[in-house]
Image: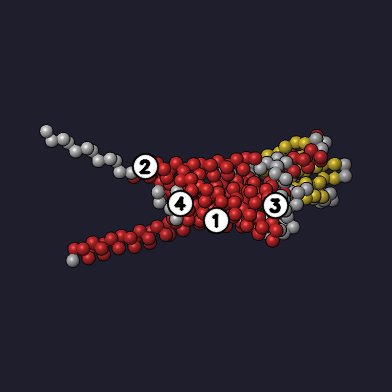
Amino acid sequence: MAADTDRSTTAGHRTLAVLVLIPAVAALALSLFAWPAARIAPRDLPIGVAGPTAAVEAVERGLNRREGAFEVHRYADAGEARAAIEARDVYGAVVVTPQGTELLTASAASPVVAGLLREAVTAQAPADAPVRVTDVVAAPAGDPRGAVLGASLLPLALAGAATGAITVLLGLRGVRGAATQVGAAALAGLVGAALADSWLGALDGSWWAEAGVLGLTVLAIGATFAGLTALLGRPGLGLGAALTILLGNAFSGMSGAPELLPSGVGALGQWLPPGAAGSALRSVSSFEGAAAGRPLLVLSLWAAAGLGATVFGARRRSEGASPSPAPAAATVG
C-alpha cells in the first residue's frame, strides 16, 4: 500500500512538472522570437552619402532626424559609394549630383533594409525631384525577397542538432564521433547547396563556397550539441538547443538585418552559429565573399570547440568512470 502511494505521489509530481514546464518553455520561445520582431527599427544602420559638401550635409541632417537610426559614412563620389556597398561596409548610399538624387541599395544584403532606405530617402526628397533608385547588388532571381534564405536557418540548425544528438545517442565518442560529424556535415552542405542553389535559385554565388558554408554551419551546431553533451551529459543537449535553436535563430537578424534588432541583440546573434551562417551565406552568394571573414571565423570557432569537447570530454568522462584498482590485500604475518 505504501509503495502504491509513493508511486502515485511521484506520478502526480511529474504531471505537475510537465504542466508547469511546457507553458513556461512555450512562453520563453514565443518571447524570444516575437520580442525582436516587434521592435524592428534601424539602429546605427550603416549608410553612405556622396556628393557636394552642402548637399551631403543636408542629407545627413535629414537622416539624423531619427536619432541613432543611421550611421552615416561619407564618400567622395558614386564610385566609392558603390565600392563600399559591394564590400558590405554599408547597406546603401545617397548620391547627390547636379542631375538629382540617386539612392544606391543592395537588396542582396537585405530586401527589408533596401525598402526601408527607399522610404526614408524618398520621404525627405522634394515632390518635384523624385529619387532614382539603383539596386547595386540585387537579390537572387529565385529569392527576390530573401524569404528562402531567411527560412533556411532553422532547417540548418535542426540538421546540425540532429547530427550532434544522433552521434551521441549512437554512442559515437571521441575521434570517431568527431569524424562522423565532419562527414555528415560535409554531405549536408552538398545537399543544401544542391537544393538552395541548383534547384531553388535562392543562392547564386560560387556553388562550392555555398556548400562549404552550409556544411560548416551544420558542423558548428552539431559539434556544439555533441561537445556539450560530452562535457555535461544530458543537460548539454538542452543547453545546445537553447544556444543554437532558440537564441541563435531568434537573434540571427536574417529576416531583416542585425542592425534592425534591439540594441545588443543583433550583435549577440552574430556570435552564434545561425547569425554567423546567415551573414556568411549572403557574402558568398551575392558579394563574392566580401565581409565573410568574421562570420566564417565564428562558425569555425564553434566547430573547433565542439569537436575538441567531443574528443577530450568523452575521454575525460571515460577515465573518470574507470574503476580504480583494488587495494592489495594485507599480508598476514
Q: CA distance from mark 1 to mark 4?
A: 17 Å
Q: Does residue 133 appear left or right of residue 109 in this picture?
A: right
Sequence order check, earlier mark of 3 and 1: 1
Tell me the tag on residue 159: 1
Q: Identify residue for label 3.
A: 207
x, y percent for residue 111:
70, 53
Q: Identify residue for label 2.
A: 319
Most foreground residue, 36 or 67: 36
Most foreground residue, 137 or 93: 137
Q: Identify residue for label 4.
A: 172
Q: Nearer the viewer, mark 2 or mark 3?
A: 2
Q: CA distance from mark 2 to mark 1?
A: 31 Å
Sequence order check, earlier mark of 2 and 3: 3
x, y percent for residue 166:
48, 56
Quadrant where the image shows the N terminus: bottom left
Sequence order check, earlier mark of 4 and 2: 4
- Identify the amino acid type marked 3: Trp
Q: Nearer the viewer, mark 3 or mark 1?
A: 3
